[in-house]
Image (cartoon, rainbow, N blue to C red):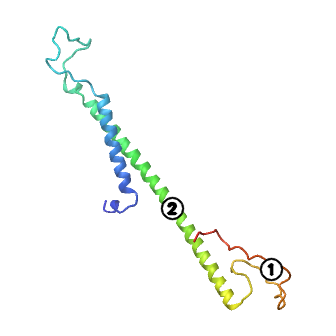
Amino acid sequence: MERLGRMPCANSALLYGIGTGSVVGLGTYLLRRTPVRLPGRWSPATAPDPPSARPRTPSTAPTGSVMKSCNYAVAAFAAVGILSFEKCQADRKRVQEEQAKLALAVSLTKKYHEQQRQKSSAGATGPLDPRVDVQPGPPPAAGDDGGAAAPPAPPLGPKVAN
């Protein structure tokens, strides 16, 4: 029970479950309860007697609607609590996966820019990304760019807005 408050999504799931169970239980009780006749409201001459009029005993008291309302409240609490907990966990997992993808994209972008700086400062030739297995051709002759200059290669990985 000590860990329950520290579990992600547990607080919101319990609050949703308790709130829904309370509303469902109260609503079920109010909709399904037997109407109560107040004494002295009708005169005996105008009050209709039901065909099976019998004195109210403890076995026919309106506890059945209370028990049924409690059952509905517990069922609603359990269902809504479990569903909201699972949805929250799925949302957290999706957000963590997106954060991992973004962290990978940022690290690849930083690595690419670092390689670009090293290349421009050292004048090195070769592939920029060690994952790419490209054999460099012979270096161009001094002053010969082979006609028109080729456009720079796009960075590997997804584009990241600065």
Residues packed near mark 1 inside 10 Å, few (<14), some (14 to 19) or many (20 plus): few
Q: Amino acid at mark 1?
A: Ala
Mark 2 residue element: helix
Q: Nearer the viewer, residue 15 or 71?
A: 15
As drawn, 75 above or below 109: above
Q: Amino acid at mark 2?
A: Val
- Tell me: 32 left or right of 136: left
Residue named by callout 2: 95
Q: Nearer the viewer, residue 59 or 142?
A: 142
Q: Nearer the viewer, residue 145 or 19?
A: 145
Q: Percent x, y for residue 118?
A: 65, 87
Q: Percent x, y for residue 50?
A: 25, 13
Quadrant housing residue 36:
top left
Q: How many marks?
A: 2
Give the distance between the C-alpha atoms of the residues marked 1 and 2, in whole angstroms: 43 Å
Mark 1 residue element: loop
- Tell me: 129 left or right of 27: right
- Which image quarter holds the N terminus? bottom left
Residue drawn where x is 35% and y is 51% of the image: 14
Camera-near label (1 vs 2) is 1
Q: Nearer the viewer, residue 55 or 18?
A: 18
Residue drawn where x is 55% and y is 71% of the image: 103
Q: Percent x, y for residue 131?
A: 69, 77
- Which image quarter holds the C terminus? bottom right
Q: Earlier in the sequence, mark 1 or mark 2?
A: 2
Residue drawn where x is 86% and y is 81% of the image: 147
Residues packed near mark 2 inside 10 Å, few (<14), some (14 to 19) or many (20 plus): few
Q: Percent x, y for residue 151?
A: 76, 76
- Tell me: 150 left or right of 1: right
Residue drawn where x is 56% and y is 68% of the image: 102
Residue named by callout 1: 149
